[in-house]
Amino acid sequence: MNFYLLSLIKTAIVVGIFMHVLAYLQWIERKVIAHVQLRVGPRRVGPHGLLQPLADVIKLVTKEDILPSHVNKVFYFMAPFIAVTFALISISIIPFGPEITIAGVRTNMGLTDLNIGVLFILGISGLGVYGVALAGWASNNKYALMGGLRSSAQMISYELPMALALAAPLLILNTLSLREIANGQAGYYWGFIPRWAIFQMPFPQIFSFILFLIAGFAETNRVPFDLPEAENELVAGFHVEYASMKFASFFMAEYANMVTVSCIATLLFLGGWHPIFPEKYGSGLIPVLIFAASAVLCFFHAANPARPFDRITLPVFGVLFLGLGGLFLLPPVQFILLPLFWFSAKVLIILFVFIWVRATLPRFRYDQLMRFAWTFMFPVALVNLFITALLVALFP
Amino acid sequence: MDALLFMIFAAIAVICGINLVVQTHPISSALSLVGVMGALAALYLLLGGEFIAAAQLVVYAGAIMVLFVFVIMLLNAGTEKKMTVRPLGKYLGAPFLLLFFGMIAYVIQKILPSSSPVVFGAFHGGTALEIGRSLFTVYLLPFEVTSVLILIAILGAIVLARKEVD
């Protein structure tokens, strides 16, 4: 098929799904944090608050777009564009699954594959700083400027341990292309331990995985490293002067960066779309079991409703889950859905960790943040890289 | 397609370069420089220098220029004052500049052979694999010496900064 047409179709699918994921990630975050704090979270708009993202988007689009009189207009308008553009670009090189054939067309799951994939991700995440820094500077507001300065200093500092943590698994996997990295983690030791980078010999990359996740928290400005927008010190930090869709762009950029970091962690450390145990022991049945269990739970709670509407909404969800589970048993779509399931399951688990940490940990102080990066993360990442290199050289 | 992409990114690089000089505010100039570097990275990609393109993005656009912008923000530098241009420079400057560029382009075209690919020493191809192999076999000694040099520069920077504090 025509390369351009195929790329266009794939782009439409990926962008469509990605935008919905970003919108619903916020719903998930609010729900999870609410449940951690023993609340119920949003549940007014739609069943169980499922239409809340839509309501939020309508609210943000229709809000008055305030333009403060004292801002530097060009950069004030440019900053949200820069932030959101560089946050969305990275998804283009992330592979979601193996090579597949649909209706006689062979194609990769994922938009494209660069042979400098990891470097490209690092470069793009470095450029993302400009959005935040410019927003802080152009707002002409002392709180915003502090936020922008903190953010650029923090991102530069944490890029170092992040790059060092990324380098260690690359030594084992011997490539920079994300697709080949995922393929290099296929197979199992003794038939059941996956050859993911966090388990792979000669040196399991569990330390670099943890280092990468911590640096990822700092790169995406998430709690406990959300100093650029610390509410109690800086009101809202770099986006304090932004309203309506421009504010939403920063929000979207933050969530897109979270998804990117989770995808990279999945691909580099958790084996991408490769299941946690071999197909022959029935790993293909895991999604069916999960969806069936969810359906049973829905039906049970529908039979014993806690709220009046649950009698109607929960059976609908139950049937939906059964249908989704059934899809995984159909051979014609199974080969697409199974890798997608494993990939998104791992990404969602890491995203859950992001939200879980936000609900649990307090914020660092700024000097603690910097000391942590330079006197703890950096040496540990170096030692980890050194040991990995030594062992790779000794046991090739 | 290659020629078209080259024209687009070359145009971006030149426009950003001119903008860098014309703008009066340091932040605008710094961001134009980022634009030049991004366009250069795309041009390197077109030439097959993938690693150089990525390094350009990571090192120059992503790290060095962020530090520039950071410093400009910290110093809170304002807009520069423009000097008045004398009428002689105003009317004769542009034609002479064009003449100068034309001469440079002509000389470069005469000197360089038109069709053979450019080769730098033992480097063949621009992928990370090939560059890494050359760096750690043929150019091992220069590579390590350079790394020591950079280490000395870092130490020197720290020492100089220390002295300022006391």
Image: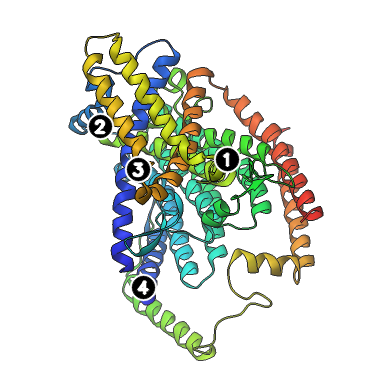
Tag 4: amino acid? Met
Kindly state the secondary structure of the residue where label 4 is placed. helix
Query: In the rendered image, which quarter is residue A37 located in?
Result: top left
Q: Could you tell me residue A336's position as x and y percent?
A: 39, 49
Q: Nearer the viewer, mark 3 or mark 2?
A: 3
Residue that lies at the very extreme toward the right in this rendered image: A394
Q: Nearer the viewer, mark 4 or mark 1?
A: 1
Marks 3 and 2 sit apart, C-alpha to C-alpha, by: 21 Å
Depth check, front residue: A33 or A50: A50
Q: Which mark identifies residue A277? A: 1
Kindly state the secondary structure of the residue where label 2 is placed. helix
Kindly state the secondary structure of the residue where label 1 is placed. loop
Q: Earlier in the sequence, mark 3 or mark 2?
A: 3
Depth check, front residue: A349 or A131: A349
Q: Is residue A26 above or below residue A171?
A: above
Q: Could you tell me residue A202's position as x and y percent?
A: 74, 47
Q: Residues within 10 Å of mark 2 (few under 14, many from 20)?
A: some
Q: Nearer the viewer, mark 3 or mark 4?
A: 3
Marks 3 and 1 sit apart, C-alpha to C-alpha, by: 28 Å
Q: Nearer the viewer, mark 3 or mark 1?
A: 1
Observer able to see residue A95? no
Tag 3: amino acid? Phe
Residue bearing mark 4 = B7
Residue bearing mark 2 = A244
